[in-house]
């Protein structure tokens, strides 16, 4: 533990412990991965103002996201198949997030079900919804999220069709996994992971399996899922979902200022400036580079979050200084989960909080709520 100093340390350890197909699933972008790389590298272009001889005592990272208290301006992003990074991964990550005081967002495509994760935690989850062609399923899933006590719904808008991720195809990632020499070696070289998976009954998409009439095994589940993402998704559907949910709604996948302005008209509570972690439109702008443009377009009429490329507490400081109310992390916590389970998720949050606290202090700030554009160097 003493040697784990940064998120990249967790990444290296996860790569050693998680089968290649699942590590690469979390660590890949679409096509050339240009957008994925830009999400990270564009943060480095933003310089902060160093201030000295100011009182740095009694610092606080506490703030709010959609009016809910958070220990730092961060939420865990929804990530599909989290339970394949580590057995019962969603449960462990949600517990670590709850203990740290940041929201955990459960994906529709999670391995552990809504009910499983809610039963293992005491504070309300956030739940992420993909819009399926089966509107009755969507409605029932929203009702299940209500019954589980979820305090926010995150609606993902940028996955109507799935962009190609070369690593997944080369690794033979599919459900059920194709058994050949390639996949056999991936599992055989990760005995600890295999042993952990043998200890849990959760191996399917828990929010879907058992809730669809004709889905009876992994093969039929995969076939149903592949045909269900709705290519006709429109702003009218967003309004329908808001009516069904009747609670705090966050729209994820807003990258264009015009879309941000349209989102305001739907009455949503917040938007997430995001390009799906570089996993969808390759060649798009990075999320952090579009954040100022979106903020300028909405003029404070809606709360703005951002997601994509956050790897350090310094990145959180940059996003907050530009005007984001909070950020989301996906890969950093997945690295921690794959490396060390629940303890690894906690470690990833500790690393980010320490880096953010130190950076804020060296910028001459004591309260994260006072951070703003004045902290950005020209």
Image: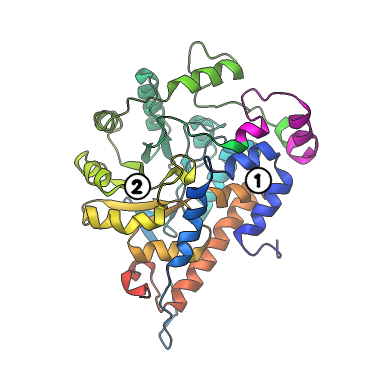
Task: Please say whether residue 85 is visible from this viewpoint.
Answer: no
Which residue is labeled 1 in the image? 338
Region of the chain picked out in magenta, as a range? 168-195
| Badge nearest the viewer, 2 or 1 | 2
- From the viewer's side, name the closer residue of 211 and 250: 250
Dot 2 or dot 1: first in sequence order is: 2
Task: State whether residue 262 is above or below residue 177.
Answer: below
The quadrant of the image that shows the C terminus is bottom left
- From the viewer's side, name the closer residue of 157 and 193: 157
Q: Is residue 3 magenta?
A: no
Residue 20: x, y in percent?
69, 40
Task: State whether residue 1 is above or below residue 87.
Answer: below
* Magenta portion: prevailing SS class: helix
* Residue sitting at x 56%, y 52%: 332
Pointer 2: residues within 10 angstroms few (<14), some, or many (20+)? many
Horizontal placement of 9 versus 113: left or right?
right
Which residue is labeled 2 in the image? 255
Horizontal placement of 346 versus 144: left or right?
right
Task: Name the secondary structure under disc 2.
Answer: loop
- From the viewer's side, name the closer residue of 344 and 120: 344
* Residue sitting at x 27%, y 43%: 259
Task: Name the secondary structure under disc 1.
Answer: helix
Residue 91: x, y in percent?
57, 39
């Amino acid at each position: 533990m003493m040697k784990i100093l940064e998120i990249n340390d967790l990444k290296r350890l996860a790569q050693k412990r998680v089968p290649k197909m699942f590590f690469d699933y979390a660590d890949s972008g679409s096509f050339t991965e240009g957008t994925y790389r830009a999400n990270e590298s564009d943060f480095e272009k933003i310089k902060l103002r160093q201030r000295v001889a100011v009182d740095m005592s009694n610092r606080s990272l506490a703030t709010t996201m959609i009016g809910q208290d958070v220990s730092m301006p961060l939420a865990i992003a929804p990530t599909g198949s989290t339970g394949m990074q580590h057995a019962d991964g969603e449960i462990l990550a949600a517990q670590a997030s709850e203990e740290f005081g940041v929201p955990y967002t459960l994906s529709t495509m999670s391995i552990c079900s809504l009910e499983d994760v809610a039963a293992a935690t005491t504070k309300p989850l956030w739940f992420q919804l993909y819009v399926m062609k089966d509107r009755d399923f969507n409605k029932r899933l929203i009702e299940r999220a209500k019954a589980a006590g979820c305090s926010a719904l995150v609606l993902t808008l940028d996955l109507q069709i799935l962009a190609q991720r070369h690593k997944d195809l080369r690794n033979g990632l599919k459900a059920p996994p194709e058994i050949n020499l390639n996949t056999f070696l991936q599992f055989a070289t990760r005995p600890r992971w295999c042993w952990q998976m043998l200890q849990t009954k959760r191996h399917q998409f828990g929010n879907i399996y058992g809730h669809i009439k004709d889905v009876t095994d992994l093969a039929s589940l995969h076939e149903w899922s592949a045909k269900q993402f709705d290519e006709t998704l429109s702003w009218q559907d967003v309004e329908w979902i808001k009516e069904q949910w009747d609670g705090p709604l966050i729209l994820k996948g807003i990258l264009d200022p015009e879309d941000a302005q349209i989102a305001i008209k739907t009455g949503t509570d917040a938007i997430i400036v995001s390009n799906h972690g570089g996993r969808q439109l390759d060649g798009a702008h990075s999320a952090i580079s579009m954040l100022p443009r979106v903020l300028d377009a909405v003029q404070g009429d809606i709360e703005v979050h951002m997601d994509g490329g956050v790897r350090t507490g310094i990145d959180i400081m940059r996003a907050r200084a530009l005007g984001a109310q909070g950020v989301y992390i996906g890969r950093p916590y997945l690295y921690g989960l794959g490396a060390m389970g629940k303890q690894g998720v906690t470690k990833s949050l500790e690393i980010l909080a320490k880096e953010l606290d130190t950076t804020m202090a060296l910028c001459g700030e004591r309260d994260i709520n006072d951070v703003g554009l004045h902290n950005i160097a020209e």
